[in-house]
Structure formats: C-alpha cells, structure tokens
Image (cartoon, helix red, strand yellow):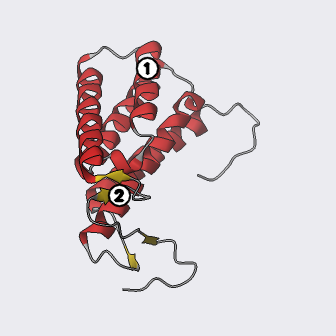
C-alpha cells in the first residue's frame, strides 16, 4: 500500500539492480551476504559473553561498546541479528542497574535498539513488493522487547534523579 505524507510508520526502500543490495544498492549481493553473516556471528558471540560473564561496571560498558560497533550498519544486520541486538540490549540494561552503572552510560543502547527497529522495518519492506513505499511494521515480540528496554531505561533515569530535580515524562 502507499504511504501518506507524514506517516512515520512507512518506509521507503530502494529497488536494487540484480546482484546488488544494501540500503543504497552499493554492494554486491555476495559482499552483503558475507558481511551480514560475519556481523551475525559476532553478535551471537557477544550474546554468549553477556550470558556467561559476571556483570560489573566494566563488563557492561564493554558489552555496550561492542553492541554499538556491531549495530552500526543496519543493512548488514539480519532479522535474526536484530533479535540478538535486542537480547544483548536487554542484558546490558538489566545488568547496568544491578552494578550501579549510570544511566547515561547506556545511551549507546538506544542507537542499537534503533538499528534493530530499522532492520525489522527494512526486512518487512523487502519481504513485500520491492517497488515504491509501503506500510511496514516489526514483529510484536521485537516491539514488546523494545518497549521493555526503553521502559527500563526510563525507570533507571528517573531513579537517578536527585531530590528537587524537575520531573520529566518518558
């Protein structure tokens, strides 16, 4: 279906010539597939680290830094990779509160969550017709997980406010 002007739930996608891919159609399909496979593998390894490593301020900071680097290029993140990004982000946000990490240390998590959402939208768009603009949406589980992450980050921000500080709405 067509998108109405100003409709933020819609996304445009490029129609690449055969053999090319990515957001700008600038890489060959083979290069994109290899980059995506490598990025998915690295994300899976980082998820393994978050599950097996004892959380500390340093380790959670390392997880967040790694997550930021691995989620920089949404075109190289698969649908499975976006789910792993959300799992790592959840682990980092959960661990951050238990180790007393300042909420601003988690700012990079927002970029990674955005990449996961962008990836879901791009994959949903490419699953349909490859022409024009169309309505896209993420899976309900990824949407719920994203809401959960943002909600936890909001609670951490509110908990870090000092007495007398003006309240804000998340």
Q: Residue at x 33, y 40 (%)?
A: 85
SS state under label 2? helix
The residue indicated by pointer 2 is 143
Compared to 109, does 120 lie above or below?
below
Name the residue nearer the viewer: 11 or 85.
11
Characterize the local packing of mark 1: few (<14), some (14-19) or many (20 or more) Cα atoms within 10 angstroms: some
Asked if residue 120 shows in the view, the reply is yes
Name the residue nearer the viewer: 150 or 118.
118
Residue 74 percent coordinates (x, y): 40, 49
Q: Nearer the viewer, mark 1 or mark 2?
A: 1
Residue 169: assigned label: none
Characterize the local packing of mark 2: few (<14), some (14-19) or many (20 or more) Cα atoms within 10 angstroms: some
Compared to 161, does 26 lie above or below?
below
Residue 5 percent coordinates (x, y): 56, 82
SS state under label 1? helix
Name the residue nearer the viewer: 156 or 112.
112
- Say which quarter of the image contains residue 103: top right
143 sits left or right of 152 in the view = left
Q: Residue at x 23, y 32 (%)?
A: 41
Q: Residue at x 47, y 16 (%)?
A: 57
Residue 62: assigned label: 1
Residue 155 percent coordinates (x, y): 52, 41
- Say which quarter of the image contains residue 22: bottom left
First of labels 1, 2 by sequence position:
1
> In which quadrant is the N terminus drawn?
bottom left
84 sits left or right of 102 in the view = left
80 sits left or right of 69 in the view = left
- Are the residues at dot 1 and dot 2 in contact (C-beta closer than 8 Å)? no
Asked if residue 83 shows in the view, the reply is no
Cα–Cα span, label 1 and label 2: 25 Å
Residue 53 percent coordinates (x, y): 28, 15
Q: Residue at x 46, y 34 (%)?
A: 68
């Amino acid at each position: 279906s067509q998108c109405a002007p100003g409709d933020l739930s819609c996304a445009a996608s490029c129609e690449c010539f055969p053999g090319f891919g990515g957001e700008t159609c600038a890489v060959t399909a083979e290069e994109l597939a290899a980059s995506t496979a490598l990025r998915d593998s690295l994300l899976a390894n980082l998820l393994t680290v978050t599950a097996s490593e004892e959380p500390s301020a340093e380790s959670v900071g390392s997880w967040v830094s790694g997550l930021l680097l691995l989620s920089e290029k949404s075109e190289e993140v698969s649908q499975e990779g976006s789910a792993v990004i959300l799992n790592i982000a959840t682990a980092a946000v959960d661990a951050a509160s238990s180790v007393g990490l300042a909420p601003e240390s988690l700012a990079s998590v927002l970029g990674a969550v955005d990449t996961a959402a962008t990836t879901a939208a791009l994959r949903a768009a490419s699953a349909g017709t490859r022409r024009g603009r169309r309505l896209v949406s993420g899976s309900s589980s990824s949407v719920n997980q994203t809401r959960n992450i943002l909600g936890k980050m909001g609670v951490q921000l509110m908990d870090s406010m000092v007495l007398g500080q003006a309240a804000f709405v998340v």
